[in-house]
Image: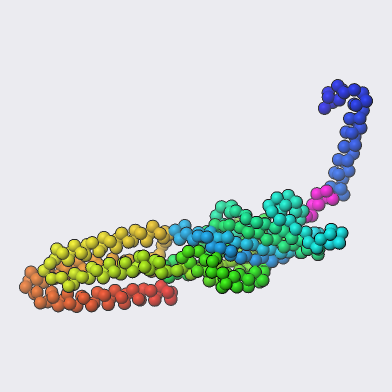
């Protein structure tokens, strides 16, 4: 720049020097402690109080998908938060409006001058998409934040009584980077009641195969990893969904029961037709094994057996029991006890169905109650 000035005419050079002096003077004024605080407003990035109470609400707008295998669910949600920041108070007459409104990602990120809590759902998978966002400021400094998100959440599922299960999926909301000494989250009961009314009135919120039953929010605290002294405020949102079991019953369980019942047709065959009886039994056993693979592919890897798993196991065992029964009859006939063999067949005609029905009912009762 100095070499550039030397090449300028003397009059122009003097003007450039004067301009540099004025710029340096202005910069020095801006960098003084008082003017620096005014220019950057160092207090605004911090919470307005210690702690700052933030009332939060979460509404489920739509449940898009539930993945049993990966134990995730995708939902469209709306998050509301409100807090008081007296630093943002303004005179409505001087401003010509009774509220300050910042909407859209650009205004929120670039124009809004105040502090806001970064509300993070800690069990969210990926970043997610923000559909809409806005901040509204009242003259007294009351701030209202509203955001609509599309989120994919990971949460453990209890599938013991599948397909008659009810899932309680959780979303854990925390203020990112602020301890409980700085920010305390409280449940906004207005949104809690509005969500319950919405669940009862809007059946379109349900995802295919599920019914949304309720949504509950509770506030609490959690310790940070590796430190018991540092705690964070959080809100746990529990979404209760009940599976519509009709399709699974008709597509998997009912054909399974019919298949097992068809194998029992061997009890009406002649006790001497061992080859035909064994063929029917082996076909039934192999078909049940194929059913097990279908169920396993649509279920997460779990350390316990669901109701469907146990019913498949019982069906496998009771169908497999027809094989030694036929071999027993063959042995009796070879020894000349044809009448005894026929009597066993007649007893099995009602003993197998009754035992299967009682076992299935007992399993269903056990899984539903416990």
- Asked if the stretch drawn in magenta spans residue 167, the answer is no
Residue pictured at 79% horizontal, 55% vertical: 43
Residue pictured at 63% horizontal, 73% vertical: 193
Magenta segment, principal secondary structure? loop
Residue pictured at 35% horizontal, 59% vertical: 294
Q: Position of residue 279 (x, y in %)?
A: 18, 62
Q: Position of residue 357 (x, y in %)?
A: 31, 75
Q: Is residue 15 visible?
A: yes
Compared with 214, 176 (above or below) is: above
Q: Position of 38 compared to 103: left or right? A: right
Q: Give the mark count.
A: 0
Image quarter hosting the N terminus: top right
Q: Position of residue 37 (x, y in %)?
A: 83, 50
Compared with 173, 24 (above or below) is: above
Q: Which image quadrant for residue 239?
A: bottom right
Q: Is residue 141 visible?
A: no
Residue range in magenta is 37-48
Residue pictured at 18% horizontal, 64% vertical: 278
Of all residues, the one furthest to the left in this rendering is 336
Image quarter hosting the C terminus: bottom left
Compared with 244, 346 (above or below) is: below
Q: Which image quadrant for residue 350?
A: bottom left
Q: Which image quadrant for residue 201?
A: bottom right
């Amino acid at each position: 720049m100095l070499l550039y000035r030397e090449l300028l005419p003397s009059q122009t050079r003097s003007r450039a020097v004067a301009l540099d002096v004025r710029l340096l003077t202005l910069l020095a004024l801006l960098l003084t402690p008082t003017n620096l605080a005014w220019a950057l407003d160092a207090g605004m990035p911090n919470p307005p109080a210690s702690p700052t109470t933030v009332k939060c609400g979460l509404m489920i707008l739509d449940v898009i998908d539930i993945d049993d295998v990966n134990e995730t669910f995708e939902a469209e949600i709306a998050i509301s938060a409100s807090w008081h920041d007296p630093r943002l108070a303004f005179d409505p007459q001087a401003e010509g409006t009774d509220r300050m409104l910042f909407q859209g990602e650009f205004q929120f990120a670039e124009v809004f001058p105040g502090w806001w809590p970064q509300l993070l759902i800690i069990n969210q998978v990926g970043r997610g998409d923000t559909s809409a966002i806005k901040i509204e400021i009242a003259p007294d400094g009351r701030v209202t934040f509203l955001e609509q998100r599309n989120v994919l959440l990971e949460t453990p599922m209890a599938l013991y009584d599948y397909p008659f299960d009810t899932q309680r999926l959780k979303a854990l909301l925390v203020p990112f980077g602020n301890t409980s000494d700085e920010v305390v989250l409280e449940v906004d009961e207005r949104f809690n009641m509005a969500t319950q009314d919405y669940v009862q009135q809007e059946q379109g919120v349900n995802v295919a195969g599920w019914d949304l039953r309720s949504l509950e929010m509770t506030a609490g605290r959690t310790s940070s990893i590796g430190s018991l002294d540092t705690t964070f405020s959080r809100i746990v949102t529990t979404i209760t969904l009940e599976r519509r079991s009709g399709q699974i019953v008709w597509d998997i369980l009912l054909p399974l029961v019919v298949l097992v019942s068809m194998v029992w047709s061997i009890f009406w065959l002649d006790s001497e037709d061992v080859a035909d009886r064994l063929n029917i039994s082996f076909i039934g056993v192999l078909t049940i094994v194929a059913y097990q693979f279908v169920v396993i592919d649509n279920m997460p890897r779990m350390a316990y057996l669901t109701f469907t798993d146990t019913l498949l196991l019982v069906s496998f065992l009771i169908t497999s029991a027809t094989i030694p029964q036929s071999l027993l009859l063959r042995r009796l006939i070879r020894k000349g006890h044809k009448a005894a063999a026929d009597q066993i067949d007649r007893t099995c005609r009602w003993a197998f169905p009754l035992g299967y029905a009682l076992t299935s009912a007992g399993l269903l009762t056990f899984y539903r109650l416990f």
